[in-house]
Amino acid sequence: MAGLDWTYGVSTLRQWESADYEPSLPVSEKSNPLTRDIDQASAYSIVKMLQLCDSQMFQEEAGTAYQRLLSDQVVKTLMEVAKRVAVIIKDPQESCVVMSGCGTSGRLAFLISSGFNKALSQLNQSKVYSYIIAGGDRALLSSQEAPEDDPRLGVLSLKKVCEGKKRVLFIGISCGLSAPFVAGQLDFCMQHPEVYTPVLVGFNPAHQASVVQRMQELAKSQKAFLINPAVGPEAISGSSRMKGGSATKILLEVAFSAAHAATFSNTPITYNGVLEHMKAYERTLDVTYSQTDGITALVEAAGQSLRCSRHVYYLGWGSLALLGLIDASECTPTFGADYEDVRGFISGGYRELNNNDGPLTSLGPKFSIAHEDFLHLILPCLTDKDTVLLIYTHPDDATEVGNMARRVREKTPNLHAVHHQADGDTAASLQQDDIKKLCLSTLKITWPRETLASGTLQHMQRELSTKLVLNAVSTGAHVLKGKIYQNHMIDLQVTNTKLYRRATRLLQKLSACPEENCEEALLKAIYRVDMLTVEMTSSDITTHTCFARNSTKVVPLALVILLTSWSLMEAESHLKQQPIVREAVAQWMW
Ligand code: S6P
């Protein structure tokens, strides 16, 4: 438990809010004081740290510059957005709600639009929600970081989705308020106010960027909306898939649920209604993290698999499986992982996914996502060093889960389950007992019995709970594998502007060298040369990031070069001998 003090006071939880804490960085890029020693922590301590980080999402406003999730302004804006959505639901022929984002933000746009369209279909209503993800549907399952930098691409995709619509509520999601893809779309919306009402969701205070400034101006007359509470720095610096993703899910689901309740069950959209709904999500954190031991067991199992270069497989049912697919897909850009390291599979494959472009299997092996694919491609080679995690909620799925558990159990005892159950559900408990016997560990998350009205809300809470558990598993496992230095991912891919800047800053922080030298070392590592040519140094960031797509270990190499003044070849061979970056550079660090 090195470095972990369990008596964290309010001051540590709130340290990031102080004006002199990493003042040059936006909240989404700051390093969280709570996780500074996460790289040295045990699985149990990692889970505890993640719990504290997540709890920062719901901290109250404390007279600082930051709005928070439960702030007055945020609740009021959500009410306004909900009212706009309610208008759109009544006119599905001519209007729609479009959510758009890059990476995780686009994946959540997909998850949320699927959930609410399903709710509409169940009521025999037409669908009104659409999603856009930078890089297209392949980005739902794989890392496509470059399109994030392209505002024109954003506009083109928006125009396509909105063809023929007279009224569009456009929700641009960018946790860091930094994606040009989304900025381009918001700008387009502001140029066409007769059709589009733009909403920006992100987790930094509005800054000086022209698009955000213009939105703030329009927000005064409710022609645009900004929802930008701060949720505190991520546990792994910049990893907005974690709290940024969770907060996106909470905010949009609260707004859309209020709109649905107003339209279909005559429940007025009220301040208290919205606030109470947000607080229900706060309780989700408590319900989930009351299972620290269970989550720790999963982190340990997954960590052990990754440490011996084996794999972690998420086998899920229903929308919880989608959270598995999303979590797995994020391991590549976040930890420089191979797609085979952590993989997700969904019962029903693309039929269940129901994405815009349909089956993507022809794009390559990483797009095989059905349970059948797991049975054909993975099961035959499964060993007890691999970790398999069953993720499910519906009692209806229990037979299928049981069958799958038996198949896996024939190959490995390293089988685990995460499942959600209503309090006192004895029928589910009986089936569950059989599955439990087959598993090495079972994480049972128990929810209060639902009334009909609370059913959908609780399902969304179960999704969030699953997201928290899986984020903990994949993050914790990669930390245990040695992929993190302090609370920074050193081996990040440098494939867009945000990541390029993050890499340069990280090199500055870790080497204490001037920015100029850091950028020079970064370029040497990208272009794999000891001497940079004029052509290289005069190219723009886009050119560098395009080139970096084919280079590996860029930042670790640059760091070794900076710390040692070795040649590129010497640095490369050092990293080959010691692939765990933290250990490779430890001798030169304080
Ligand atoms: C972050 C994740 C990234 C981001 C993407 C969009 O953990 O790996 O893919 O989601 O870069 O970021 P943002 O700030 O525009 O939501």
Image (cartoon, rainbow, N blue to C red):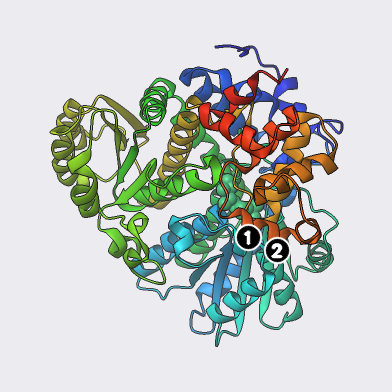
Query: Contact, CB < 8 Å: mark 2 with mark 1?
Result: no
Question: Can the viewer see residue 24 in this picture?
Answer: no
Q: Which amino acid does label 1 sit on?
A: Cys
Q: Which amino acid does label 2 sit on?
A: Pro
Give the label on residue 546, or none: 1
Residue 186 percent across, percent down from the top left: 70, 69
Categorize mark 1 by other alpha carbons within 10 Å: few (<14), some (14-19), many (20+). Answer: some
Residue 142 relative to residue 573: left or right: left
Q: Please name the residue shown 54% across and 28% down the image.
A: 51
Residue 391 percent across, percent down from the top left: 31, 41
Report, in whole angstroms, how far the alpha carbon at label 2 lies from the one at label 1.
16 Å
Give the label on residue 180, or none: 2
Q: Which of 422 and 341 is in front in this view?
A: 341
Question: Which quarter of the figure is the C terminus placed in?
Answer: top right
Please name which of the two marks, 2 or 1, marks the residue nearer to the observer: 1
Q: Earlier in the sequence, mark 2 or mark 1?
A: 2
Query: Under tag 1, what secondary structure?
Result: helix
Picture layout, residue 86 above or below residue 290: below
